[in-house]
Amino acid sequence: QVQLVESGGGLVQAGGSLRLSCAASGRTFSIYSMGWFRQAPGKQRELVAGISWNGGNTYYADSVKGRFTISRDNAKDTGYLQMNSLKPEDTAVYYCAARSSRYEYDTWGQGTQVTVSS
C-alpha cells in the first residue's frame, strides 16, 4: 500500500503563489503516476494536473495551463504542485492521488485547503 500526505495549502491573495507537496510512503515503487485533484463547494472533483512517476510526462487541465506546474522528486518520493497567478476560482480542497497503473487513481491523500481571496 501507498500512503500520501499533502501539505502547503493556505490563504493567499489573487495573483499570489502556493506550492503544495505530497509525500508518499509505503510501496512507492508501485506508483505509476501521481495527480492533483481539486474540489470546490458544490462542484465535482476535477483533475488539474498529473505526472508519470518515472518518465515525467505531464498533463494539465486547460484552466491551469501556464499557471500551475507539477513535478516530482523520486529520491524524496514527493510530488509537488506549484501554483502561480492564483485566482479566486482556484479556491478548493486539493487532493493528491496515486495510481499503480494507467487506470483509476486508487490512493488518496487527506486534502489541503487552498483559498484565494480577491
Image (tube, grey):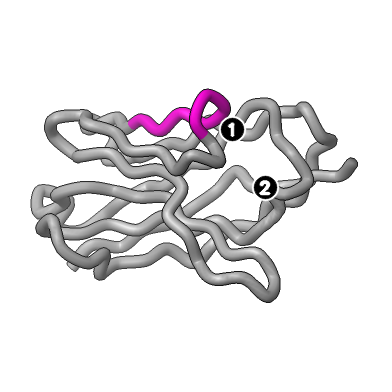
For the residue pair 41 and 80, the one nearer the viewer reads as 41
| 93 relative position to 107: left or right | right
Residue at image x 22%, y 67%?
Answer: 104
Q: Which residue is more in the foreground, 103 or 2?
A: 103
Q: Residues within 10 Å of mark 2 (few under 14, many from 20)?
A: many
Q: Position of residue 45 (x, y in %)?
A: 50, 67
Taking the image as shown, residue 51 lies to the left or right of residue 14, namely: left
Could you classify mark 1 by the number of other residues whose Cα lies within 10 Å: few (under 14), some (14-19), or many (20 or more)? many
Helix, strand, or loop for circle 1? strand
Kind of residue sitting beneath label 1: Met
Mark linked to residue 32: none
> In the image as oriented, which residue stretches furthest toward the bottom?
42
Q: Any magenta on residue 70?
A: yes
Mark closest to the chain's N terminus, 2 or 1:
1
Looking at the figure, which quarter contains the C terminus?
top right
**Camera-nearest residue between 83 and 1:** 83
Q: Residue sitting at 62 percent across and 70 percent down?
A: 43
Going 43% across and 36% down the picture, which residue do you hit? 80
Q: x%, y% of residue 60?
A: 40, 38
Position in image of residue 79 (x %, y %): 36, 39
- The foreground one among 64 and 38 is 64
Q: Which residue is mark 2?
A: 90
Q: Is residue 23 left or right of residue 12?
A: left
Give the distance between the C-alpha atoms of the residues marked 2 and 1, in whole angstroms. Answer: 9 Å
Q: Quadrant where the N terminus lies?
A: bottom left
Which quadrant of the figure has residue 103?
Answer: bottom left
Q: Which residues are magenta?
A: 65-71
Residue for badge 1: 83
Q: Secondary structure at mark 2?
A: helix
Residue ranking furthest to the right = 118
